Image (tube, helix red, strand yellow):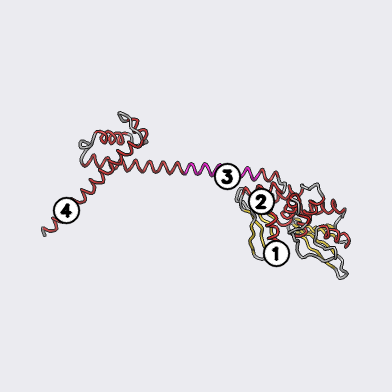
Amino acid sequence: MSFSGEVKEELSRQTAGARHCQIAELAAIITLCGSVHISVKDEYCIRMQTENVWVADKYFLLLKRIFKINPEVSVRRNARQNKVSAYQIMVAENDDAKRVLQAVKLLTPEGALAEDLPLVHNVIVQKNCCRRAFIRGAFLAAGSISDPNRFYHFEIVCDTEYQAKQLRDLIRSLKIDAKTVKRKKYHIVYIKEGSQIVDLLGLMDARMALLKLENVRILKEMRGSVNRKVNCETANINKTVNAAVKQMEDIRYIRDTIGFSGLSNGLDEIARLRLQYPEATLKELGLLLNPPVGKSGVNHRLRKLSSIADELRESKEENYYDQKTNHDSDF
C-alpha cells in the first residue's frame, strides 16, 4: 500500500465525537467527490463515487451515524483484473437526500441547490475542530500525499478555482501555508514543506502517518548534515593537500636553484621540515620547530618561501628572454 493509502486508511478510522464535526467532514466528502442529481419530479439524489475503499467506508459510516441512513452501495469490478475499480454510494430517497444537503449547507431552506460550498462565514467550519474535520474529509475525498522517502508533497484536487481558494484559505487559517496551482482542468491545493505537512497530518489526527513522516525527515536531516560535514572536511583536506603540494614544489625549486644556505635560519628550518614531513599540518610543523611556532607563524614562513620561489622563476624567465634577445641580435 502506498503512503497516501496508509494515511487514508488511518483517517478512515478517525471519527469526531461531536455531530457538528462529523457534518463538516461529510460536507467535504460530498463537495469534492459527490454529485447531486434532481429528477424531473424535483426529487434529490446524492451519489458519491470513489476508488478508495477507506473513503467509501468513512462516507457510509458518517451517513449512518449522523442521519441513520442506510445508503445504497454498488461495486464496479474490472473484469480483466478481477479487482474493484470503483465504489458508488447513493442516497436515493428524496427526504433523506434533502436532510443531508441541508445539514451540509448545500441546500438552502428555500430548496435552492448551492453550486459550490461557501466556506467563508459558513457555520459548519466556524470552530477549529470543524475545520480540521473538513480538511480531513477533503483529503479523504480528493487528496494524496507522496512517499516521504522520495520527496514531500501534499495535495487536494478541486474541480473549480473557487473551491481551491476556499480550501486554501481554510488550511491557512490553521497556520499552514497552503498554495494553489492549476493543473490541466483541475485546481490543486498543495503543500511542499515537510514540517508543514507534519503539522497538517497532526491536525487531521493522522498520528501514525505523522510519526512515520517525522522519522523520515529526521533521518534525511541527519544524512544531509553528515554529507555537508563530509563535503566540508573533504574540501578542507583537498585545500590542505593542494597547499602542501605547492609548498613542496616551491621549496624544492629553491633548493635546486640557490640552495638553503642563503635563507634565514627560520626559513631554512621550516623548509627542511616541510620536505621531511610532507603530510604534516601547519600546527604539527609549528610544534616541530625549536622553539615551537603557532600556525600563523608557520604559514607566514611558508608564504615567504613561496614568494622567494616565484621571484626566482621570474628572474629565470627574464634572463632567458634577455639571452634570447641577444642571440637574435647577433644575426
Reading the image, the residue beneath label 1 is 160
Quarter of the image for residue 236 reads top left
- The residue carrying pointer 4 sits among few (fewer than 14), some (14 to 19) or many (20 or more) residues within 10 Å by Cα, namely few
Reading the image, the residue beneath label 4 is 322
Q: CA distance from mark 1 to mark 2?
A: 23 Å
Q: Is residue 58 above or below residue 270?
A: below
- The residue carrying pointer 1 sits among few (fewer than 14), some (14 to 19) or many (20 or more) residues within 10 Å by Cα, namely some
Of residues 95 and 54, the one nearer the viewer is: 95
Q: Could you say whether the residue bearing mark 3 is in a helix, strand or loop?
A: helix
Give x and y (percent) for residue 79: 76, 59
Q: Find out whether the residues at labels 4 and 2 contact each other: C-beta distance under 8 Å.
A: no
Reading the image, the residue beneath label 2 is 175
Q: Amino acid at mark 1?
A: Thr
Q: Amino acid at mark 2?
A: Lys
- The residue carrying pointer 2 sits among few (fewer than 14), some (14 to 19) or many (20 or more) residues within 10 Å by Cα, namely few
Q: Earlier in the sequence, mark 2 or mark 3?
A: 2
